[in-house]
Image: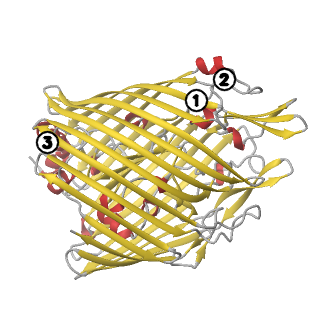
Amino acid sequence: MTLKQRLGLASATVLCMALAHQARAQNVDYGALEQMFGQPVTTSATGSPQLASQAPADMQIITADDIRRSGATDIPGVLKFTAGIDVRTYGTQDSEVAIGGFSQVYNPRLLVLVNGRQVYNDSYGFTVWNALPVQLSDIRQIEVVQGPASALFGFNAASGVINIITYDPLTDKTDTLNVGIGSDGTYLGSLVATAQKAGKAGVTVQLGGIRANEYSGDSLPALNAPYQGNADNENYAIDGRAKPSAHTEITLEVTHSDSSESSQSIIYIPTSYRFRTQSFKAGFSADTAWGLFNVLGYLNKDQGTSSLPLGGTVDQSSWNQVGVVQANDLFKIGTENAFRIGVEYRTNREWDPADFNGSSDYQDYAISGMWNWQITPQLSLTNAGRIDRLVVHRTSPVVPGTPYTQADYARTQLTAPSFNVGLVWEPTSNDTFRALVGRGVQAPSQDELGLDVAHPVGGGITQITAGNPFLQPSVTVNYEIDYDRVLAPIESTLSTAFYYSTVQDLLTASSVLPGTFTYPYYVQEAQNIGNGQVYGTKLVLKGSDASGVRWNIGYTLTAVRAHLNIAGPPTTPYDFNNATPSSAIVFGIGDSWNKFEVDLQGKWQSRYTDVSAAIGGGGLIYEPKVISNFVTIDARVAYNVTPHLVLAVSGSQLQSSQTIVSAGPEVDRRVLFTGTYNF
């Protein structure tokens, strides 16, 4: 067999190893497989173990080494130097992350998970990055899938998925203490410790926190005083795995997080938030005669409290609870065909006496399947599909003046199919072509479905802000051609991607839309506001040599063409055609020699238009703010004092003392000193 044939069968070999020796359909021994094949292994493309280079998806993997060398203190700080990801900052610990255009605050189109558990917040449809209960030192890799992935992960993986994979306490031993102090009142610390009984059980306990002053706020609208106080996060997680027998495995996990931050709210006004999250997860997997069977269940509890500066400070609280049970079976027929079949039940409940007049909830029932066909050693085809059936309920009557009745909620049901098709061809050991088609679905958030607020505004008039049970899910269909080339003479890999996406039935909340007046009610309701297209290109060159030098450079071009049935600013905040930078360049260079490790990363992005809100005579007025093209430069220098102790200094926004990157406050230059002890 030729070298190319051996490489072409590598992914099939990975899957065969998992089926023959692992009882872990979702808990893959990443370390062993990565060491064997010399590159990362992923399950985020199909749900089965594959070499990242052969996955039928536009995927980038950020490794633990990448995370350490970034010097970042949070996950958005790591992601901002990844080609194709738009990260913008609104507070010391508040960022928005978008993939594939249509950037906005409270970005609802990107699904984020930790070890396959959703950390996406369904209340308003966004991710609270500051509340994630995971330490950077416990992350094995961050898997970034660019393009729809709802066929595997379900609702809200419309533009992409970020799956954060931590070390496995059964096979990895992570014992790290990290402390840091920096400018602007920054203090941080984390501890990750693992206890194991070889081959039988393992548990990892991680806890950490960070506290830092908010940015100065020079660029905030006149409506609001500068951000004050500080942002903080305290969290812990306990992750346990056990093997009762050679063919079974049990997973248990508990997490908790408390965080506070200054941020842009869903109505584009700077707001103070406090979030508390809790999760409980349990899983069981078994290596059976019918394949790798896995059942997983988890419960997420989120509580959010916001302080909005509208006519004085208004405090609001909401509670959201998500329960998920999923089961799947991964099996092979012959040596060329792998299959995965699955079912999922999800329940989601939002309750808030002020904003929801009680509670709103829905249930989702889903079936899914995947077929990976290794047609030849050089050619493979993957087909994945899923059907979701969402049933909406309301446990409390609507307020007078709301345009929908209790009966409307009782009969609302949505059926949403999604799929992914990927053809991967490797004509030589240095060349990989991918042809990809995907359909992703964004479900309405609880705010868009069930919000129900009556607010007297004077003169006998009541303002109604309402959800809409008849909203259609937003659907993204993506067509993509990728080409990867190994450039052996310069020890690099060139990755290219060309894609075209259509987006139908864009969703938006009622609170940012104009209403209709029928005395005595002024009614705002959530709507589907139009369609759009995205054209994009991505080019990435990345490499390293045996001496320790590493480099990367990437370019992305994104063009959004939205066709909305509403007006843009100042009536609404939506100007999608200009909300995403059309061009961006990321670059990095680093070196390791003797006991030193030095890395520099940068990003240039073209101008774009952000939005802030101010109060006018008729209510909120949305003010466009043009953000000029700018450069961001971060760097880190580390010294290995001993094999166990590392001292480092890192800096962010080094190019300027303050940089305008969004409609939020100017981002300050900051410096951080850290010490890391591996025991």
Disc 2 designates what residue? 397
> Of 159 and 403, which appears nearest the observer?
403
Q: Quadrant of the C terminus?
A: bottom left
Residue that appears at 42% across and 45% down = 278
Earlier in the chain: of badge 3 and badge 1, it is 3
Judging from the image, the colouring scheme is: secondary structure
User: Residue 49: x and y, percent?
Assistant: 24, 43
Q: How far is mark 1 from mark 2, CA to CA? A: 10 Å
Q: Which mark is residue 57?
A: none
Q: How far is mark 3 from mark 2, CA to CA? A: 55 Å
Looking at the rendered structure, the kind of residue marked 2 is Pro
Residue that appears at 27% across and 42% down = 252
Could you say whether the residue bearing mark 1 is in a helix, strand or loop? strand
User: Residue 558: x and y, percent?
Assistant: 54, 54
Looking at the rendered structure, the kind of residue marked 1 is Ser
Disc 3 designates what residue? 17
Q: Is residue 159 visible?
A: no
- On screen, residue 230 versus residue 587, left or right, reads right
> Disc 3, disc 1: CB below 8 Å?
no
Earlier in the chain: of badge 3 and badge 2, it is 3
Quarter where residue 378 is shown? top left
Q: Which mark is residue 360?
A: 1
Image: 616 above or below 545: above
- On screen, residue 3 versus residue 574, left or right, reads left
Nearer mark to the viewer, of 3 and 2: 2
> Disc 1, disc 2: CB below 8 Å?
no
Could you say whether the residue bearing mark 3 is in a helix, strand or loop? helix
Nearer mark to the viewer, of 3 and 1: 1
User: Residue 501: x and y, percent?
Assistant: 52, 42
Earlier in the chain: of badge 1 and badge 2, it is 1
Could you say whether the residue bearing mark 2 is in a helix, strand or loop? loop
